[in-house]
Image: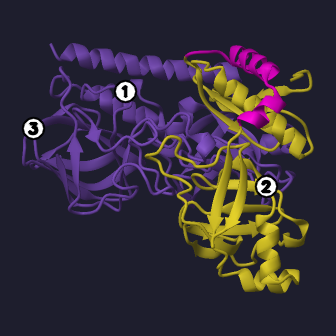
Chain colours: A purple, B yellow
Amino acid sequence: MITVTKAPPYLTVQDGGRRHSRSAGVPRGGAMDGFALRAANALVGNEDNAAALEWALGGGRLRLERDCAFCYTGGAAEARIAGNKIAPCTTTIARAGDEIVVEQITGGRFIYFAFSGGVDVPLLMGSRSTYLAGRFGGLEGRTARTGDEIRLLGAPPRTPAPGFHCAAELMPRYDSGIVHVVPGPQRHLFDDKAWRTLTSTLYRVSPSSDRTGYRLEGPTLGGAPASLASEAGCAGALQVPGDGLPIALMADAPTVGGYAKIAVVSEADLPILAQRRPGESVRFELITLEQSQRALKRRDSDLQTISQLAYRSAD
Amino acid sequence: MNTSSLSAQPLGDSAVTISFGEVRSPQLLERVHAAARAVAAANLEFVDDVVPAYLALTVFYDPRRSTYEEVVTRALDACGRADEARGRETARRHVIPVTYDGIDLESVAASTGLSIEAIVARHSEREYTVDILGFVPGFAYLSELDTSLHLPRRAQPRPRVPAGSVAIAASQTAVYPLETPGGWHVIGTTTLAMFDPARTPPALLAPGDSVRFEPAS
């Protein structure tokens, strides 16, 4: 079990999200940075999409009530356990009673703490993810509070060796700010100028951004009809409302919407976009669907490499 | 169903949107619903989700387990086997008991020129179809409201509309499954749970279902 001894401004339980939930009006949800979640799980010997803690916006403290392996991935943080600095993307051993202290998140937006066994909260619609807007999943559908006790499932049979570290070249290039996109379903509603603008200028992530979507600031794309008949959207869809400024739909975006979608972020690069903070910029680069799916497979194979190396280190 | 008029295009690298036409109509929506049921019934192992909407059906898939081309072919095959008439038979029918005590009942009466009794009668006398689900979990957009009740959304959305509120806006009516901000006119309340993530299925209403409201005595 883990006790939240000082809740950070934002802490939720997230896993790989939901399937077959959208027809009930429930988005896929799950970790904003799915790659970091899966890497964190590999580093503690868990299955890919086991539930972990998604942490953002500032410091906080957790006390571990049992011995376990843990790690953090995603953004960079100033973090200690029992007084020692915690290295990112590194399998670390905690003893019962140790306290994890995160002073602050120093780079990126979300960090993920995975614990051997994974977080144990009730499965709802096939997932342990917190859906804040729907007020269910995770810890009663809300962010963690000081005093919360979070249960862990039994440890996996093998955990990677303490100190096992995941090489940076196997992780997405978070710092590049380069986000690949494929043309969206309403691509034809935008003229050449809009396309040139989208793919040649920097867009800044607006302070008005959360798990449902990131508003982007930059030159207007104009030209699109204000609204169409509602249809399904997805995480990464760049929708363009009447003001011409794109909004990137994120993990908890409503399942359907009525704005034109000029492009969709390649799933492989969704973690890069998710990790951008308000004020940081992104550059969109156009690729084909085939390239996008190949990139996703490369990410999978990088994760497999991490997982195999971690598993081997257990010997 | 004849699928020659359908066109498919990718929605990112894990979904395909199949368009059924350009103009909204109950008939077109019925075709989309029938196709959605057929794709779901085909139980394709690579399909993660099927989302019907007014003019299109979106099929979410796992690109690790299939290709875009295969998904399009198999989804269109399933659409080809869809049968609107049978779809209507398999759709569920619901009766939702309503206490017509909504906070906006007086203002709806003032705007429409109808008496409260007439509003209740016109809202509860017809059968509605679930167009789509969205906005929040279990929120079903129901059509089509009697034209005498058509009103634009409230100019100022309320920060909180309680769960169970029965409301109207434009040509549609709906029940708020949970407390959310909302701009529809609230005319009544139901105690039926519209959404429960621990239930199977979690949403009481599904696309294509029919719904009648019954004044609670």
Q: Earlier in the sequence, mark 3 or mark 1?
A: 1
Residue A108 relative to residue A23: left or right:
left
Residue B197 relative to residue B143: left or right:
left
The CA span between labels 1 and 2 is 46 Å
The residue segment tinted magenta is B65-90
- Which is in the foreground here, disc 1 or disc 2? 2
Which residue is disc 3 drawn over? A67
Q: Which mark is residue B50?
A: none
Which residue is more in the foreground, B66 or B108?
A: B108
Q: Give coordinates of residue A211: x percent, y percent.
A: 51, 52
Q: Mark 1 falls within which chain?
A: A
Q: Give coordinates of residue A313: x percent, y percent.
A: 20, 16
Q: Give coordinates of residue A300: x percent, y percent.
A: 46, 20
Residue A151 relative to residue B201: left or right:
left
Q: Which mark is residue B127?
A: 2
Q: Amino acid at mark 2?
A: Glu
User: Dominant secondary structure of the magenta stretch?
Assistant: helix
The relative height of residue B101 versus residue A57 in the rendered view (above or below) is below
Which residue is more in the foreground, B99 or A244?
A: B99
Q: Quadrant of residue B127?
A: bottom right
